[in-house]
Image (cartoon, rainbow, N blue to C red):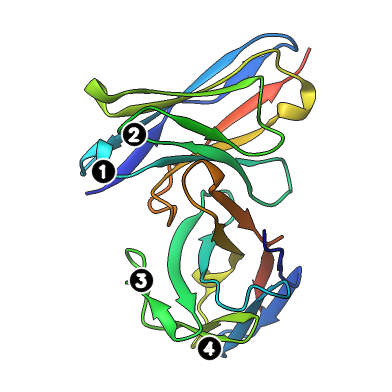
Amino acid sequence: QVQLVQSGSELKKPGASVKVSCKASGYTFTSYAMNWVRQAPGQGLEWMGWINTNTGNPTYAQGFTGRFVFSLDTSVSTAYLQISSLKAEDTAVYYCASSSWLNPWGQGTLVTVSS
Amino acid sequence: QPVLTQPPSASASLGASVTLTCTLSSGYSNYKVDWYQQRPGKGPRFVMRVGTGGIVGSKGDGIPDRFSVLGSGLNRYLTIKNIQEEDESDYHCGADHGSGSNFVKVFGGGTKLTVL
């Protein structure tokens, strides 16, 4: 069964960093790109970018450069999203999703930034 | 890149049918659109992709036959027949633009479907 399982919720203080993981199973991890999508509370979906799971080359959408880093550990079929210098406006649910079709999705990781 | 426009809300009675619309901005009439369902408190799931010729590829896992799509001009439609309570969800559309390092995925604002 193809699935993506993400790490659990995080509560962080402003200025801290967070690393979200997304573990794939049921398919060959390097066969499909991995995307990251943000959903702020009560808002729609916002595509953050993608990472080529063969080369590790990331592509970031506008607004997600600088503090956001996509990475991989192909030995454990896992993609990571790291956000540094967290701000209150980073509070959101972060999803990973496989392939350009965004199928399947992880269950989401809630990152809350609050002092 | 295209802009996708969705009505913020829609409603339909149990057992009825409803058609949700995603409209591409001018000049993008050949673009395919992906539909995603997001049930309350859950993550999105892929429903199906639609172009001007109808469905592209296969439906997402577990998507019932009651769900179908059409494409015409700048509009991409998702129709749900015999609506059930579990269909009450936010429905998002998305489209791909560009390739490689220029690839972008854009989303519409989403439509909240209420089952009456």
Percent of width and height locating residue A23: 33, 31
Residue at screen point 67% across, 9% down? A16
Number of numbered discs: 4
Residue that mark 2 sits on: A53
Mark 3, Cα crowd under 10 Å, few <14 / some 14-19 / many 20+, is: some
Mark 1, Cα crowd under 10 Å, few <14 / some 14-19 / many 20+, is: few
Q: Secondary structure at mark 2?
A: loop
Q: CA distance from mark 2 to mark 1?
A: 7 Å
Q: CA distance from mark 3 to mark 1?
A: 20 Å
- Is residue B80 or residue A54 the one in the foreground? A54
Q: CA distance from mark 4 to mark 2?
A: 43 Å
Mark 3: which amino acid?
Lys
Q: Secondary structure at mark 1?
A: helix
Mark 4: which amino acid?
Gly
Say if B100 sits above or below A9 in the image: below
Q: CA distance from mark 3 to mark 2?
A: 24 Å
Residue that mark 3 sits on: B59
Q: Which mark is residue A17?
A: none
Earlier in the chain: of badge 2 and badge 1, it is 1
Earlier in the chain: of badge 4 and badge 3, it is 4
Q: Of tags 4 and 3, which is closer to the observer? A: 3
Indicate the chain on which mark 4 is placed.
B
Q: Of tags 4 and 2, which is closer to the observer? A: 2
Whether the residues at callouts 2 and 1 have beta carbons within 8 Å, the answer is yes
Whether the residues at callouts 1 and 4 have beta carbons within 8 Å, the answer is no
